[in-house]
Image: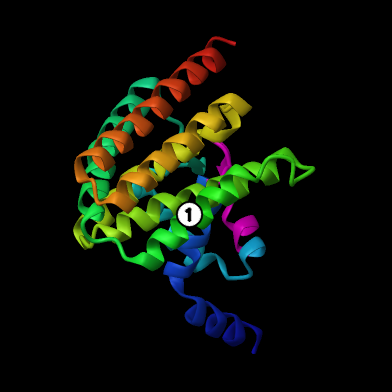
Amino acid sequence: MVQVGSAARDTEKGTYGVLERLRALILTGAYGPEERLVEEQLAERLGVSRTPVRQALTMLEAEGLVELAPNRGATVRSFTVADVWDIYDLRAVLEGHAARRAAGRIRSDELARLRELAAEMEGLAGRYEDHEEEIRALVALNQRFHGTIVEASRNKRLQRLINRTVEVPLMFKAFFFYTPHERVISNHYHRQILRALEEGDADRAEIVMREHVYEGRDFVIAALKEDING
């Protein structure tokens, strides 16, 4: 009877539900680079059996977030400086194009959402006693901000490409590297992108979005090199 109940719950939640939750845990830094992902522990944490966890890990391997190795199991993938450079380069092109398209297609409710998200990110400092909790909240808000722009591009294929490409840099806990000054710069870019979208300026929206991504890339790479060199 217990097994039947467990199977029913797994069916209800589905492998894709487990996949989304595991992906979020990795991308927000709950599991860091090269950290082992033990099926039994993950199943207990998510309240499911090991079967959907195993299937989700296989899917995450295909996405490049997880490595599966004999006798070692699953680990969160780590990335080189060259990997980060390539990922951000591609991100700048894709998100820049999304911002360009969004400038002529974004709805008023989406602009209102972007204003709210920008304000929340600006007012986040000091709201949490735990720094890691604050960064996770910031990452979530940042994802929603960028995700709203991508959604406003009205291109599902572009959206799927970006979802596969853009989330990976969060593995490096980019915002953990940010000083208050860098966060101010990031917030400034968000406001400039929002202004371009409000004005329907496609050229400006694309240019500022690319600059925003490249600024983040350069800072993350510098911080990553410093971390590698100890």
Task: Tell me the quadrant of the picture where the N terminus can be found.
Answer: bottom right
The residue that label 1 is drawn on is 115
- Secondary structure under badge 1? helix
Residue 71 image position (x, y, % from top left): 50, 41
The residue lying at 51 percent from left, 33 percent from top is: 174
Residue 104 image position (x, y, % from top left): 21, 57
Count of residue discs: 1
Residue 57 image position (x, y, % from top left): 45, 54
Relative to 196, say whether 84 is above or below: above
Task: Tell me the quadrant of the picture where the C terminus can be found.
Answer: top right
The residue lying at 54 percent from left, 81 percent from top is: 7
Q: Is residue 30 magenta?
A: yes
| Residue 60 or residue 167, whichever sits in front | 167
Relative to 114, say whether 176 is above or below: above
| Residue 2 or residue 166, whichever sits in front | 166
Q: Specify the segment rendered in magenta.
A: 28-43
Residue 26 image position (x, y, % from top left): 52, 47
Q: Residue furthest right?
A: 129
